[in-house]
Amino acid sequence: MDLQQRNTTLDPHVWLDPSQAQEIVRIIRDAFQNADPEHPDEFDANADAYLANLATLDTQYETALKNCERDTIVSNHDAFGYLAHRYGFKIQPIAGLSPHDEPSAADLAKLTQFIRDNNVHYILTEPLSSPQFAQTLAMETGVKLLPLDPIESITNDQTTRGDDYISIMTANLATLTTALQCTTPQSS
């Protein structure tokens, strides 16, 4: 995988880009075929079906994020760099690559000013990270919070509901189109 470096740290969140997720599926398929060479057709069929779903998801992202009024999101942590790079938007994270990083008071002051200067309407928060700093910024600036899931761990409740990578990434797309104020071109 082609990992991006941020400052001195490699960004591990490659799975959040559906096109990179396709490469991950191919790597997994090949590993299973090497481990169980008697069933290559089964692994090919399963991988091909999932690759088709990922290709559709990639197209949905490309289409939905093509015409947006905004080009930057404010998010809980800097997990969405691959996604942003792929679909042409930027991120102003509250914390760094780890969801456990905490911003300094100066960082929060800069983000508050960024939100005001850029008329940001939403801060994107994650289900398993503390929303404390996002809530503080939202109260200070009057913006709303929206969920954006980095799929770092799926809860039992999500599994019970049938949530998976495709459904969570589809929900993420809805959040991004709202936060970036995207419009879908009308077909004639």
Image (tube, grey):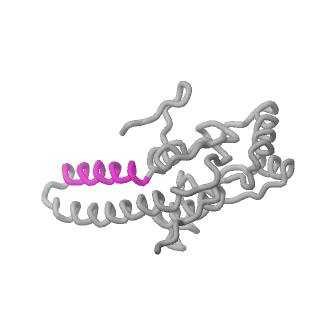
Between 39 and 175, the one nearer to me in the picture: 175
Is residue 127 at least partly visible in the picture? no
Q: Is residue 156 above or below residue 79?
A: below
Q: Residue at x 48, y 59 (%)?
A: 61
Image x and y of residue 174, in percent? 58, 64
Image x and y of residue 143, in percent? 79, 55
Q: Residue at x 82, y 35 (%)?
A: 109
Q: Is residue 82 left or right of residue 51?
A: right
In the rendered image, which quarter contains the N terminus? top left
Magenta residue span: 18-34
Q: Residue at x 56, y 44 (%)?
A: 79
Q: Magenta stretch containing residue 20, yes or no?
A: yes
- Of all residues, the one furthest to the front in this rendering is 188
Q: Is residue 102 left or right of residue 43?
A: right
Image x and y of residue 181, in percent? 64, 59
Q: Is residue 76 left or right of residue 65?
A: right
Q: Residue at x 61, y 56 (%)?
A: 148
Q: Is residue 38 above or below residue 5?
A: below
Image x and y of residue 69, in percent? 63, 54
